[in-house]
Amino acid sequence: MKRVAFLGTGLMGAPMVRRLLAAGFPVTVWNRAPEKAAALATDGAMVAASPAEAVAGAGVVFTMLSDGNAVRDVLFSRGVSEALAPGAVVIDTSSIAPQMAREHAEKLAQSGIAHVDSPVSGGVVGAEAGTLALMAGGDAAVISGLADVFAPLGRLTHVGPAGAGQVCKLANQQIVAVTIGAVAEAMMLVEAGGADRGKFRDAIRGGFAESRILELHGARMVARNFAPGGPSRLQLKDLDAVAALAEATGLTLPLTEMVRSEFTEFVAAGHGDTDHSGLLLHLETMNAGAPAQESK
């Protein structure tokens, strides 16, 4: 059984660790907030005091961190790259800029360490159930050799060379954001027209408008429960990265730019840690001139 280190045990990382432990992998964990890593000891994880300590002797290292700067800091400023033995593999499941992922792959390759950028989609629910969509960029042989490690986490697709996983994740987040905006606007429209939001959602389930966004985030909008599963500040971070990639490739993405503008205003108004389905609150404020009440 491969020895696994997992760096970053927050909302997504913790349930992913539990899935790996349940599959029988020995897992050592580290988190910037030590209490989040310590909570996994009762599930059978070994807890390390530093990221370099966590990866010592590991054949596979997962990172699930907030952004590219955090990944770079942990890998190259906190002793991780030096502590890893040649032949080890780093699987970065964080959502970061594609070019940064390529840079990390190139730098680790100089030390004989393989790198796979494999951001995930499916949220906390998918992480807990082991049904994440895993979009892997990197060497095909390396990725196929990790099938047993990926299996407890969800469905793996090799999408291309280094950085391709991050490109696909950005496209995924682009679709998520635009769809959240569409569902939120529809919720307001049906209520303004005299229909019930919950009944509306029930009525269109299974039709052409069906989606995981309608299923999960539509339910959040009906219940007005916007406790974070996917914080809006992270949704905005991804949309900013989409905008940067679009600019670099000469693309104009009008729907994405519109929803990015709305998330920018929503986060600036103090809702960075509100779930991204809470964009409904921002749209309601635009239309009513007064802030809607948010459920905790």
Image (cartoon, helix red, strand yellow):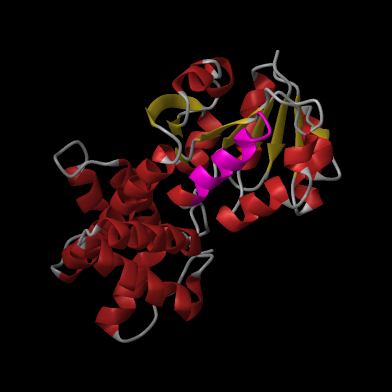
Residue 87 location, quadrant? top right
Depth check, front residue: 292 or 36: 36
Q: Is residue 110 magenta?
A: yes
Q: Is residue 291 magenta?
A: no
The segment highlighted magenta reads: 100-112
Q: Is residue 185 left or right of residue 168?
A: left
Secondary structure predominantly adopted by residues drawn in magenta: helix
Q: Quadrant of the N terminus?
A: top right
Determine whether 174 is above or below 26 in the image: below
The x, y position of residue 278, in whole percent, is 40, 64
Let me know if residue 123 appears in the view. Answer: yes
Residue closest to the far front:
110
Q: Please report the residue visible at 69 percent of the width from the left and 54 percent of the height from the top.
A: 73
Residue closest to the far bottom:
289
* Number of marks in picture: 0
Q: Is residue 108 left or right of residue 151?
A: right
The x, y position of residue 139, in whole percent, is 47, 25
Residue 212 location, quadrant? top left
Depth check, front residue: 20 or 194: 20
Q: Quadrant of the C terminus?
A: bottom right
The x, y position of residue 187, in whole percent, is 24, 61
Q: Please report the residue visible at 42 percent of the width from the left and 63 percent of the height from the top.
A: 236
Let me know if residue 67 appears in the view. Answer: no
The x, y position of residue 76, in whole percent, is 70, 48
Q: Please report the residue visible at 18 percent of the width from the left and 45 percent of the height from the top.
A: 209
Q: Please report the residue visible at 29 percent of the width from the left and 80 percent of the height from the top.
A: 286
Residue 108 location, quadrant? top right
